[in-house]
Image (cartoon, rainbow, N blue to C red):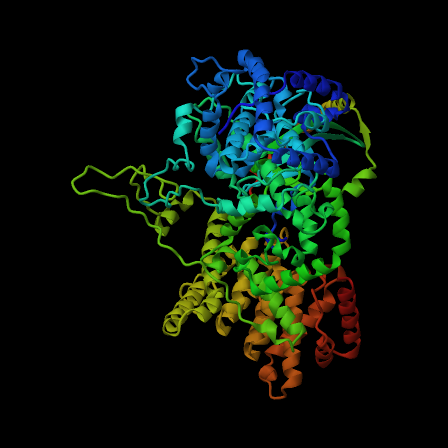
Amino acid sequence: MNYMPGTASLIEDIDKKHLVLLRDGRTLIGILRSIDQFANLVLHQTVERIHVGKKFGDIPRGIFVVRGENVVLLGEVDLDKECDQILQRVSIEEILEEQRTEQQAKQESERLKLQAVKERGLSIPKADTLDDF
Amino acid sequence: MFRFQSFDDDCTLEEEEGLVEEEDEIDQFNDDTFGAGAIDDDWQEEHARLAELDELVRDGPPGPADASSGDLTPAGSNANPSALPPPSSSSRLYPDIDERAGGDLAESLTRLILGSDPAIAGVGTASSDRSHFPPKLSSQAPHLSALSGQSLMRSYQHHQHLLHRGPAPLSQINSHSIWENSMGFGPVNSGLVNQKEDKTLMSIIKEVGLPNRPPTLSREEGRDLSERVPPPRSSSPVIGSPPVRAVPIGTPPKQPMSQVLNQQNNHPSAIHVRASVPLRYPPPFPERLSPNNLLSIANSPLSHPPFPAGVGPVLSQIQRAQLLNSQVGQFQRGPAPPLLQGGVGGFRPFFGQSGPRMGPHGPPLGHTPIRHNTTHLHPQHRRMLNQRMQNRGSGDHVGGRGVGDRKNRDPYSNLMTQREKEWVARIQMMQLQSTDPYLDDYYYQNYYEKMEKRQERDRDNRKEHTTKLITPQVAKLEHTYRPVQFAGSLGKLTVSSVNNPRKMIDAVVTTRSDDEEKREKQVWNKRRQILYTVEKMYSLLLEVQDFEKKFLQTPEHQRDALLEQHKTHTLQLYNSLREKEWDDRVSDEQCLMIMSVRKGKRLISRLLPFLPQPQAAAVVMGIARNLPALAKKDKQDQVLCWLVEPVTAVIQSMSSTSLTDLLQELQGREGQLPLVLQNKFGVTLLYLILSEGERMQSSDPNCQLMDDNRWTELVFSVTRELLKVPSSALSSPLFTPPNLVSLFSRYVDRQRLELLQEKLQITSLSR
C-alpha cells in the first residue's frame, strides 16, 4: 500500500532493518519500528557499529529513540547483501581500541600539519571567514 | 463483577521453578534488551492451546473464577510486603488487593480506559497471566494497563472466563518483555500450559511491583471515570483556537460494541496468527488511538507529576503490540495465515499483491492505490504513479511472498499500527497542501510541466497529455486574530493557543527604505553593494518571468493591468542598466559592475530574452564594448559563456547596421581584438557576428551590409588579426559556425584563406 505516492516517506520502511547515520558520527543499525512526522525514529535491536579501516565491531544497544533532527541519513539494509561483507568483524574491545588509535593518529597528523603551516608563515582560514555569496 | 480469583498454592511455586529452568533457552541478547518476552512460537501449538482454553472458558465462569481467586491469595500475600505502596501514600492504587475486593478498582480502571485503546485492554489481559512472576518489575505501566485491560474486558464482555484465558501468551511476552528485565520468564509455552488460571490483580501487582511508583489511580478517581473520555486538553478557550476536541484529532472512530462482540463470537478461533500475536479474542475495542490519544489517556489519570516519563509511551507500546496483534487476528478469515503473519511487515507485500482479495476485510484494507489525500498531485505525477503501481502489482507477485514469509518471523512487527501510519501520512500530506502551488512548490510544478511538454512532444498523437494543469488549491483562509476585548476592561485578554500565540509586545515592523540603505553603503563593501543591486534586479526579473503564468490565470478584466505592470517591470529592469541620460546606451559602469559578479552575469543572460530588441541590442553592445574588462574579471568564474545563448538570439534579430556597429564595438579600441580573441566567449561572439553577417549577405542580396564599407573594413581587420595572432593566443570558441569559410572567401585571397582555415580548424579541433 502506497501511503504517500511521489514523496519520500518512512512509512514504507517500517519493520525493516536500517542503517542510520547520526550527526555525531555514530552508525546505528536497527529495525525501524516507528516514526512520526519529524522523522523521529524508534529503532529496535539496535547495534552501534564502529568502523575502523576494514574492521568493524558491534555494540548491542537495545531500543533507540532518535530525534529526527539528529539523523543525517538512513537507508534500508539489504539482508542478502549484508551476508557477504568484505569487512572483518572483530570484538568490541578490539574495535574500540582501534578507534582510539585512529583518533590519536588523526590528531597527531592535524597537529603536525598546523605546525608546519605555521612555520611557513601561512594560515589556513577557517571556513566561516571565507567570503562567499 | 470483578472478583479476585485465587490460584492454587502450588501453581505459583511450580511456575517459578519452571521458569527458572527454562531460562537458558532464552536468547540472552534478547533478554538483555527486552526480558524474556520475545520468543518465537509455533502458531499451531498456540492455536491448539487456545482452543483448549476456549473450551475451558465455555465451561462456565464459576470454575475458573474459583481457581483464579485462589490464585490471588498467595500472589497477594507475596506482593503485599514488597509491591504495595504504603497505605499512607496518597495514591493507593490497589487498596482492594488486601481485601480481595479489588474489583472496584479494577472496574473503575476499566471505565477509565473505556474510551481508550483496546491495546490497553489487550495488555491487561495479556499480563494477567503472569501471576507467577516475581514482583521484580519496577515499571508500573504494564501494571496499570493490565489492570485496566482486565477491567475493561470484564465490564465489556462480562466474560469472566476471559480472565482465565491464557491470553495470548506470546503477546504477553511481547508486552512484558520490554520492561521486565531478567524476570526469569520461562518460555511462554510452559507458562501458559501450566497456568491456565486467571491472573488477578494481586498477581499483576506482584509481577509488576509497585514500590517506587506512585499509583496512577485512586479509587475515587477511578470511579468517576466511568464512560469518560480523556480530559479536555488544557488549551485556550475556543476563541481563536481550534475546537477543543474531547477526542484528539486522528483518533480512529469508535466502532459499536455489537460489531466487536459479533466478531468475537463468530471467530473465536481467530488465532491463526504468529505466536507473537495475541492469540485470543480481538480486544473489545478494535479501534485504535493515535499516539496522542494514547498518551493523553495514559497521562490523564495520572495526577502525580513524578510519574515516570517512560510510562506513557511504554503503555502505548504494549497497547499497540496487543492491539496490533489483535487486529491482525481479525484478518484471519482471509487468505492463508502464513501470508498474514507478521503483521505489517507481512502485510505490505500482501497488500501490494492481493489488494482485490482483501476487499471484504474491512476498512483498513480497503484503500485505493492512490489515496484520496493525494489529490493535489500534479496530474502528470499521478499518472506516473499509477503506472508504477500497476507495474509493481503485476511484477512483484511472486517476490512478495518470499518476503512475507520472512517477515512472519518477526515477533515485533506491527508495533506501529495502521492507524498510526495513516496518521503520520496524513500529517505529512497536510504539509503539502498549499494555497499557491507555484509559490510553495515551484520546482515540482515546473518539473512536471516540462515532463508533460516533453511527452507531448514525443508523442504528438496522444491528446491526453495536453491537459492543462489544474492543481486543487486549498482556499486561503483569513487567519488574522484579533485579541478578544471586552468593553471597559483594561488591556487585552491574554489567552493564547497554538494558532494565536500571545503577543507580548505591540511591536511595529518598520522596514528601512532604500535610501537609508544607500546611506549606509559606505559601510558595506563594494561587492555586497553589487549583490544587493543584482538581487533587486532579480526580483524584478522573476516578476517579469512569471508574467506569462500569471497572465493566464488572471481573469480578463485584470489582464490589462497586469500587462501594464509587466511593461513597467521590464522598463525598470532596463533602466537599471542604462545610462542616465542616454536611452539607447547601456551604462558601462553599471553593466560592468553587475557583470563582475557571477550572479550578475546569470542575471543578464536571463534578462536579455525579455528585453525588447533595441534595448537588448544596447546591452549586447555594452557587453562587446567592455569585453576585455569583463573577460579579465571572469577569469575565476568562467561563466561568460552563459551569455552565448541569449546573445545569439539577440544577434540573429539584429539589423545589419546594428550588426556592423556591434562588430565595431567589439574591435573598438586598439588592441581590443586580440584580447577578445583570447577569450572563449569573445571568440564565440565574434564568430557569431561574422556568421550572422554572412548569413545576411548570402540570403538577402539586397542586404544593406555592403552599403557602406564598414562591414568590409571590419571583416578585413578581423581577418588580419586572426592571421596575426599566434594560435596559442587564440581561444577556441564554443562552436564554429559553418559559414565562416564562405565569409572569409569573399574577402581574402586564396592563400590567406587557407591559412585562416587552418587556424580555424585548429581552433575548432582544440576545443
Residue B174, position as x, y percentages in the image: 65, 31
Q: Which of B450 and B55 is in front in this view?
A: B55
Q: Is residue B180 above or below residue B287?
A: above
Q: Is residue B393 left or right of residue B63?
A: right
Q: In this view, does B331 lie above or below B651?
A: above
Q: Is residue B560 above or below residue B678?
A: below
Q: Is residue A84 left or right of residue A119?
A: right
Write down the quadrant of residue A78 in the picture: top right
Specify the farthest residue to the left. Answer: B488
- In the image, what residue occupies the spot 51% across and 41% down? B289
Q: Nearer the viewer, residue B678 or A98?
A: A98
Q: Is residue B623 left or right of residue B26?
A: left
Specify the farthest residue to the bottom. Answer: B702
Write down the quadrant of residue B265 in the picture: top right
Specify the farthest residue to the top. Answer: B81
Residue A91, position as x, y percentages in the image: 79, 24
Q: Which of B310 and B530 is in front in this view?
A: B310
Q: In this view, does B656 lie above or below B500?
A: below
Residue B425, position as x, y percentages in the image: 55, 48
Whether residue A123 is visible here, answered yes or no, is no
Write down the quadrant of residue A25 in the picture: top right
Whether residue B271 is visible here, answered yes or no, is yes
**Quadrant in which the C terminus of chain B is drawn:** bottom right
Residue B82, position as x, y percentages in the image: 55, 12
